[in-house]
Amino acid sequence: MHATPIIQIRGLKKQFNPPEGPVAVNGIDLDIYEGEIFSLLGPNGAGKTTTISMISGLLTPTAGEVHIAGHSIREDPIAAKRAIGIVPQELALYPTLSARQNLTFFGKMYGLAGKELKQRVAEVLDFTELNDRADDPVQEYSGGMKRRVNIGVGLLHRPQVIMLDEPTVAIDPQSRRNILDAVIELNRRGTTVLYTTHYMEEAQELSHRVAIIDHGEIIALGTQEELTRLVGEEDTLILGVPDAPQAVIDRLAQVDGVHSATLEDGEIRVLAKNGRSALVELIGVINAAGLALQSVEVREPTLEAVFLHLTGRALRD
Amino acid sequence: MLAKIYAIAWKDIYTAFKDRNAILLMLAMPLILSVIIGLVFGSGGDVSINPIRVGVENEGGALGAMMQSAFVPGDGAANADFQTIHDLTDGEVVTDPDAARQQVEDGDLTALITVPNLDAYLSATPPDAAPPPITVYYDSGSSIGSSVVRSIVQSIADGWNTVFLAQQVGTDALASLGEQSGIDTQNAQQALADTLQNNPMAVAQSTTITLNETDLQGETRDYDALQYFAPSMAILFMTFTMAAGGRSILNEQKDWTLQRIMTTATPRGTFMIGKLAGTYLTGVIQMVILIVATTVVAKMMGREASVWGTHYVGIALLVLAVSFAATSLGLLIAAAAKTAEQADAYSTAALFVLGMLGGSFVPIEGLPDALSWLPKITLNYWGIRGFFALAYDKAQLSDISTHLLALAGMGIVLFAISLWRFNKRLDI
């Protein structure tokens, strides 16, 4: 299925204000294949937006190469840019213009004109279900509607690859659902999707493959099955034990089958090979310490667990 | 590429004129302020608040002496006759004409009047050649003061022309009258010749000197405060619009619309040219609307003088030049700032100071020597003086060529600097 890499990234690095400045992206190698949804998952500040900015030609890499549809973004930026559509995290729209005017303007920036431009604008308004409000100023739209216009702009020229940078930040659950459905629909129509997020659930739901990025480096890459295998198919048990002393947590970590036990936000997180089996013994340790167990939750292996396993931190940290 | 430039420019013009607050600042405010100031000062007033500095070079002769008395206060009886002019001007006798010309060029003197010795033309047998002209060397940038000086000199010259005419025609007419009537007019002719030759000052002074006189083409020159304040307000508020235009580049960067455009196959230069064109045309449209509006309002107020003059080519060229300089200034301010908020603060401070120096609020005349060059570094100065020269002095294109060149030069230099700065900035 994934024979042709439509985006090839080799040794991509970005250091701001070298030689002493911070390294935002540190030597990334990636192949993103035609027809897949590829997620770049990582916490805020991990280097996702910097990576997207270099792929789209907004930032000049300190080192490395990016090829899009066979064109180098450095040597042949115009051809490379024609193959991609960008949906930035920010609402990159003119608020006093209507959705139709925004789409028409950016359509012209993509080189569309005349009947073709009108047709594409109409298609995008259909796709984003904004026909009824197409001529109202964008500043009068709800947050979700603005997000839809923001996505629509990136689709105008029917790009081979659409890159969405955290498109669901700060919107209501229903709008988020609409956006995720739109991404799936776009991919169903044949568009390759590069999706960045710090929401594990979104990456899990959408992606064919996921790259986990932290401190500017890819720390894991593969399908969800491949990644969860990294944590040894361990379950995460979340035990609600207020004020648990470190000695008890250390004892929990020594229970048979338990990989680790940590205290986070007043909850004990335990990684165990077979969570449900270990649960009885874990509860026994807590009871023996005279502590009250207020809640228990068992989570199957997730990308969150993978991130925790690899970094020792939660994604939201 | 052209389609993209047009799209970017049109988007900026459309959004500028769709913004109600912007319309208030761009059109309503300058119009209202112009009218209020115009009503306060009315027509026929004088906007000059400082004495006009004049140098008089007297090459000998009665006319030179009279001109000197007119502009330079002295002890003689003539002093009282020219008190009105003395109140208005600050005259001095010039002994070094080259230095005085330099002072005019530096803006230290408003005008240098050189009066040749014309006594020979008052003799019984005047020379055949035409008398040499009186020369007024003036600063085209200081149109108000120089207009007053030229008007006074013209008035005095007109009085002397009367003397010459009487000298040349009067005695012949008396002789002819004597021949026809048989009366001996010899004594009368002699008395007339003696009076004109011996007391030319008294004869010339009998001509009333006024400040609202007829120019060389014989057209009446009317002064209206709107001729000064309509362009000054229009230019001041246009500079604010242009600063907002420059600032919009920073806003596009902040809102990520700039980055989004950069991710399309649109070169950076195309974006910058589009922004420049949009901002520039917004300024031109604003100026044109204000010119039309103030003209209509002036007519409705019953003002007789043309607020902007009738030299439409000159007006158009000045609008284009002053808008270009203002666009470049706006871009430079935006390029110097790190954020849109910083650019807002910079532009408010800079444009008020430049407006004040350039005479947008009150005409700036007679600054101390060390500061006399300051107004000339502002586009407000050259723009206001240019428009005023067209309206009040009925200047021709050659008269405002300095203004046009100064504005174009400012525009080119400021634009080049801002482009260099922005080129570094847009490496996002």
Image (tube, coloured by chain):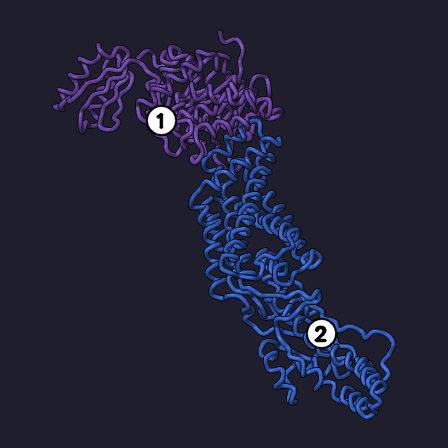
The vertical placement of A126 against A54, above or below, is: above
Which residue is denoted by mark 1 in the rendering?
A144
What's the distance in space between the residues labelled 1 and 2, CA to CA? 75 Å
Disc on res. B53: none
Counting from the top left corner in percent of width and height, residue A83 is at: 55, 20
Image coordinates for residue B21, horizontal then vertical, percent: 42, 46
> Residue, x 59% and y 79% (percent of image)?
B84
| Disc 1 + disc 2, Cβ < 8 Å | no
Q: Which chain is assigned blue?
A: B
- Residue B336 in view, yes or no: no
B233 vs A261, nearest the viewer: B233
- In this rendering, the label closer to the viewer, 1 or 2: 2
In the foreground, B146 or B312: B312
Q: Is residue A91 left or right of residue A201?
A: right
**Which tint is chain A?**
purple
Secondary structure under tag 1 reads: helix
- In the rendered view, does B316 fall on the left or right side of A12? right
| Residue in the foreground of this view, choosing between A256 and A67 | A67
Q: Amino acid at mark 1?
A: Gly
Work out whether residue A248 or residue B66 is closer to the camera in this orientation and state it.
B66
Label 1 Cα crowd, 10 Å radius (few <14 / some 14-19 / many 20+): some
Quarter of the image with the N terminus of chain B is top right
Looking at the image, is A34 positioned above or below residue A111?
above
> For the residue marked with disc 2, what is the amino acid?
Ile
Q: Is residue B77 left or right of residue B301?
A: right
Residue B408 located left or right of residue B200: left
Q: Which residue is mark 2?
A: B113
Image quarter for residue A92?
A: top left
Residue B71 x %, y %? 65, 79
Residue drawn at 52 percent across, 58 percent down: B298
